[in-house]
Image (cartoon, rainbow, N blue to C red):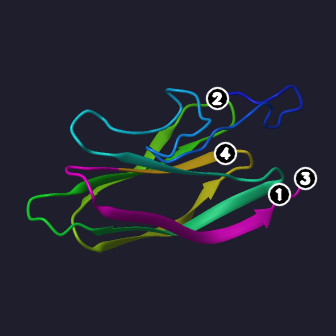
Amino acid sequence: VTAGSGGTSAGVVYVAVSGVSSGVPTGVVYGNLGTGNQTQLAVYTVPANKTLYIDTLIFTAAISQANNYATVKFNTRELGGTFRTRVIETIQSNSNLIPFAYPLSIPEKADIECRAIASAANNEISASFEGVLIDTVAT
């Protein structure tokens, strides 16, 4: 939520997959939501002095059981702000390619989050985006 006094990461950052939490304090790992479903999270931060222009977002799921699905979200948070959902989709067993007519501009130091939650356990879900990272020009 916050950065150190120098405006960069400060302290220890823990990242783990549920069940692989050796050395990670309780409550840090994303995990079971109480119904056997898992929520997974992927995060990227746009480097300082750069702007990311995303032109395509891709969600893919391999869900073999009928009537099961995944809800996938693409969120962004500008420095000092809160997460804002930019795309939310429900998918089953397919790839969902989402092209943007005009590239989605993500400013420096903004966080990008791709999140998925499935209606049942043991599903393969992935997210990716394509775009270009451009140096920010000072005026």
Q: Main secondary structure of the magenta part?
A: strand
Q: Earlier in the sequence, mark 4 or mark 1?
A: 4
Residue 122: x percent and y percent? Answer: 27, 58
| Residue type at numbered disc 3 | Ala
Q: Are marks 3 and 1 in contact (CB under 8 Å)?
A: yes
| Residue type at numbered disc 2 | Val
4 or 1: mark nearer the eye: 4
Q: Which residue position is annotated with label 2?
A: 1
Dot 1 crowding, Cα within 10 Å, few <14, some 14–19, many 20+ = few
Q: Is residue 37 left or right of residue 84?
A: left
- In the displayed structure, 129 sits above or below 1; it is below
3 or 2: mark nearer the eye: 2
Quadrant in the picture for residue 9:
top right
4 or 2: mark nearer the eye: 2
Residue 46: x percent and y percent? Answer: 71, 53
Q: Which residue position is annotated with label 3?
A: 138
Q: Which residue position is annotated with label 4?
A: 110
Q: Is residue 12 left or right of residue 101?
A: right
Q: Are marks 4 and 1 in contact (CB under 8 Å)?
A: no
Q: Earlier in the sequence, mark 1 or mark 2?
A: 2
Secondary structure of the residue carrying numbered label 3? loop
Secondary structure of the residue carrying numbered label 1? loop
Q: Which residue position is annotated with label 1?
A: 136
Residue stretch in magenta: 117-138
Secondary structure of the residue carrying numbered label 4? loop
Q: Earlier in the sequence, mark 3 or mark 2?
A: 2
